[in-house]
Image (cartoon, rainbow, N blue to C red):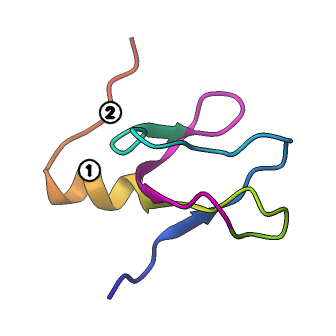
C-alpha cells in the first residue's frame, strides 16, 4: 500500500514521464525539488496521457538522512 505519494499529470500534450525515468528528481518551475519519481503509466489521467507517481522529496531525504545541495 502506498500512502502520501504524489500523483502527477501532464499539463502539456506530452506525457510527464516515460519508461526509464524512475529515480529522476522532480522539480517545479523555478527549480524547487519536490519529488523522486518511482512509477508511471502510459494511459489514464484526465487527458489520457498517463499518470506519474513520486515520493515526496523530504520523505526520501529523511529516510536516508540526506540533504540536497545547491551548486
71 vs 17, nearest the viewer: 17
| Horizontal relation, residue 5 to residue 51: left or right | left
**Spatial CA span between label 1 and label 2:** 8 Å
Is 40 rendered above or below residue 12? below
Q: Which residues are magenta?
A: 27-43
Q: Neighbour class for label 1 at 10 Å: few (<14), some, many (≥20)?
A: few
Name the residue tied to disc 1. Answer: 61
Give the x, y percent position of residue 38. 37, 55
State which quadrant residue 24 falls in.
top left
Q: Is residue 42 left or right of residue 49?
A: left
Name the residue at 60% across, 57% down: 42
Q: Nearer the viewer, residue 70 or 21?
A: 21
Label 2 sits on a secondary structure element that is loop
Whether the magenta-drawn stretch holds residue 48 is answered as no
| Residue 12 vertical position relative to residue 40 in the rendered view, above or below | above
* Left or right, residue 52 beside residue 9: left
Q: Name the residue rendered at 32%, 88% in the picture.
A: 1
Residue 2 on image: x %, y %: 36, 82
Q: Residue furthest left?
A: 64
Q: Tag on residue 26?
A: none
Say whether residue 38 is magenta: yes
Mark 2 surroundings: few (<14), some (14-19) or many (≥20) residues within 10 A: few
Q: Is residue 35 above or below residue 28?
A: below
Disc 1 vs disc 2: Cβ atoms closer than 8 Å? yes
Q: Quadrant of the C terminus?
A: top left
Tell me the residue at 69%/45% (across/down): 15
User: Residue at label 2?
Assistant: 68
User: In x, y percent, where is residue 58?
Assistant: 37, 55
32 above or below 48? above
Amino acid at each position: 500500500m502506498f500512502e502520501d505519494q504524489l500523483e502527477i499529470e501532464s499539463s502539456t500534450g506530452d506525457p510527464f514521464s516515460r519508461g526509464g525515468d524512475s529515480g529522476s528528481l522532480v522539480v517545479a518551475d523555478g527549480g524547487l525539488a519536490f519529488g523522486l519519481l518511482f512509477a508511471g503509466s502510459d494511459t489514464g489521467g484526465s487527458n489520457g496521457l498517463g499518470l506519474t507517481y513520486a515520493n515526496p522529496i523530504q520523505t526520501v531525504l529523511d529516510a536516508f538522512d540526506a540533504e540536497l545541495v545547491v551548486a
